[in-house]
Amino acid sequence: MLREVRDLRARLEGSGIVVPGSPVCPRPVTWQQLTLGGPVPAVAVAITGDTVAACADQARAARRAGADLIELRADLLAVPADTTPASGPEDTPAAITKPVRWAPQELAGLWLAAVRAVAAELHGSGVPVLLTVRTAAEGGGLDTDDVTYRAALADVIERLGRERGAAAAVDVELARGDLPRLVRLARRAGLDVVASSHDFMATPDDVEMLRRLHAMQDAGAAVAKIAVTPAGPADVERLAGAAARARGELDIPVVAIAMGQAGTVTRLAGGVFGSALTFATAGSAASAPGQLPLAQVRAALAVLHP
Ligand SMILES: O=C1C[C@@](O)(C(=O)O)C[C@@H](O)[C@@H]1O
């Protein structure tokens, strides 16, 4: 029975008919051994270590666990505090720790060191690296203004271009501005851009979700990703609907996730609605609420995408 369903699906897809459950993506992306946008969603594991050494350890574990893609969440790296006195002589009570204000080049240097360490662990495995620097505005650990974010990202992109192959792609937040320019820089450096948008409070209305995904493709991103927070089943249904519509309207792979407990189903069955990638854990801390262990996600994918 399963074989008959598979054969029928293959015949329909062969004649250009989009079959629910195995969306066809006109412009899939290939990074090393991984293709995003095929009939089965890929599984990413996020590296959430706060030191370069911890990131390398986590990458090794994620590779062994069978991740298709490693996302390095470089925003979670600890930025050493500046302990010089804010004002007054050092022996006065004014000798308090200053807030951390790193220059873009310093941030880029820290992220680059972590990319190198993670890439070294993955060498020869065919598992690509996605470099992500999530800002505090979208639930991440990098608490800077948009100008610093863009400058640091541009710097790390250019430096990655000089060491081709360390990372396959870089995450760029749509809402931080300048996405088309960062896409051009990334292309020149031999990197793809995964454009992203996160809402940790709510699920935007359907028109807005679609608008963001289209804006990402229009800016030249290779992948369009949205993660939202549902208040309940109705929001989960809307997110799934937006994913299915985006899959029909866009050429590039779409990633759509409902975060938190209410959205768990989208981490398992997102592929049925057109989502090309899901995020799972492999022993270390989750990078967003609702992520499940990789083995559970694989088991669900095997049922839904035989
Ligand atoms: O964009 C995403 C998706 C995500 O937020 C999730 O909900 O699994 C996890 C992040 O690390 C990643 O960058």
Image: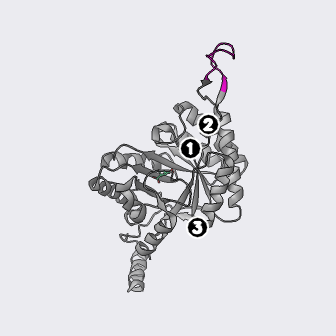
Question: What residue did someone put label 3 on?
Answer: 66
215 horizontally vs 170: left or right: left
Q: Residue furthest left?
A: 234
The mark nearer the N terminus, 2 or 3, is 3
Q: Could you say which is closer to the camera, residue 87 or residue 262? A: 87
Residue type pointed to by label 2: Ala
Q: Is residue 153 magenta?
A: no
The residues tagged by marks 3 and 1 sit, at their Cα atoms, a distance apart of 23 Å
Question: What residue did someone put label 1 on?
Answer: 133
Front label number (2 vs 3):
3
211 horizontally vs 172: left or right: left
Q: Which residues are magenta?
A: 83-96
Which of the numbered marks, if any, corresponds to residue 152?
A: 2
The mark nearer the N terminus, 2 or 1, is 1
* Residue drawn 38% across the image and 82% down it: 5
In the rendered image, residue 37, in percent from the top left (x then y), is placed at: 49, 63
The mark nearer the N terminus, 3 or 1, is 3
Front label number (3 vs 1):
3
Q: Is residue 277 visible?
A: no
Contact between labelled residues 1 and 2, with CB atoms less than 8 Å apart: yes
Q: Residue furthest top?
A: 88
Contact between labelled residues 1 and 3, with CB atoms less than 8 Å apart: no
Mark 2 burial class by Cα count in 10 Å: few <14, some 14-19, many 20+: many
Residue type pointed to by label 3: Gly
Front label number (2 vs 1):
1
| Mark 2 element type | helix
Quarter of the rendering occupied by the N terminus: bottom left
